[in-house]
Image: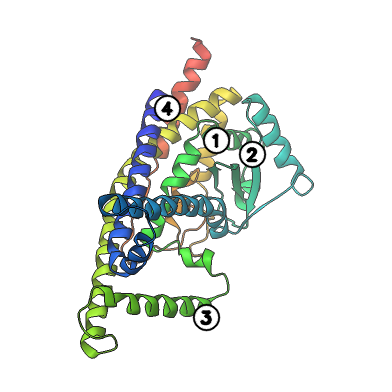
Amino acid sequence: MRTLTRRMLWTLLLLLAVDIAVVATAAVLLTPWLAPVRDAVAAHLPFGGASARIAWWVAVLAPALVAFVWAQLRYTRAQTMAEVDARIVGPEEYPALHERVQRLAQLADLTPPRIAVADADVPNSFAIGTLGGATVVVSEGLLATLGGDELDAVLAHELMHVANRDATVMTLASFLPSLTNGEYDPLDDLLPGGSGSRYALGLVALGFAYVCSARVLAAPVGSLSFTLGFLFLFAVTVLFGGVALGVFTAPVVVLGRSLSRAREFAADRNAAQLTGDPAALVEALETLEGNDERPGTDKRTAYAGVRGLCFLPHGFDTAASSDSLSIEARSHPPTAERIERLQSVARSLETGP
């Protein structure tokens, strides 16, 4: 647990530093278009010079950072479940599942999380942790494949992710890799109306940027040289913004992979201790790994962010990955190594402290 806690702390600190760096970089890249707004604000301040510049940057970065963190929390709470067609279910619909989770949560002295069921034949599960509470997601395939002590063991594993708080850290850490891979589009949240709204917003934003470019471009507004200068400036901003996003994502990926291994081993060990039956989790791992009935294709594309959170790394579908560049945020430890460690836990429970 000490190793897991240390890695979680480092990951959280890095996420905060990366969030600040992303917001600051975006502000710098957008400076040519924000300059008129900055000048208008500075003209109404009772002070000028360096104090006015500092006040401007604080006024821009502080709300932008809050909005960026809010976007991450919204992503982990809604977008992740939407990607696997999961929905919150009540005890009247899945009474046995709720009874299991309630019983295990009581054993762990844990507030029972929300329960969601994903419409997927692939047996898998994962836990989402946010500041507003936790959600355990299981697939229909998992409920059909496992039962009894094996299902209890998997649910206990997910509850341990919630209890250890690593579910919250990992769901937050999935945001930048998913954004970089193109798996998450912020405009989907801002513009639920469809492509028409997106095009309209894009045209308005381009028009605003075009007019504001007069602050940094010497040519007359509307001239060919002004338009070419604007297009060049816009292309450079997009290019460097994409490169910077990839650079900032890289350390999150590295620490996320390291945290993934530690958190899976910890959740396995804690779940085995909670149920007192390590063999049940071993049998669940062997059953799911040996399940050859997973579909070879799926209507949904492979979603790396969810795969990194799952009990087993194949995620909720087995569709072939895209040939485009993809950044994997996490890597699971080998199942054989997990089983070996669980067998060690079983021996220690048999022999006592």
Q: Is residue 295 above or below residue 352?
A: below
Q: Specify how the rendered protein is coloured.
A: rainbow
- Residue drawn at 60 percent across, 47 percent down: 138
Question: Mark 4 sits on what residue?
Answer: 341
State which quarter of the image contains the N terminus.
Answer: top left
Residue type at the position of mark 1: Val
Find residue 80 and report its horizontal and vertical position in percent. Answer: 53, 54
Residue 278 visible within the image: no
Q: Secondary structure at mark 3?
A: helix
Determine which residue is flagged by label 2: 113
Residue pictured at 41% horizontal, 28% vertical: 5
80 lies left or right of 112: left
Residue 211 in the image: state x and y as whole percent. Answer: 34, 79
Please state which amino acid type lies under the numbered disc 2: Pro
User: How many numbered discs?
Assistant: 4
Q: Amino acid at mark 4?
A: Arg
Q: CA distance from mark 1 to mark 3?
A: 40 Å
Disc marking residue 196: 3
| Image coordinates for residue 46, horizontal then vertical, percent | 37, 53
Give neighbour class at mark 2: few <14, some 14-19, many 20+ (Cα, 10 Å). many
Instruction: Tell me the CA gap for discs 3 and 2.
Output: 38 Å
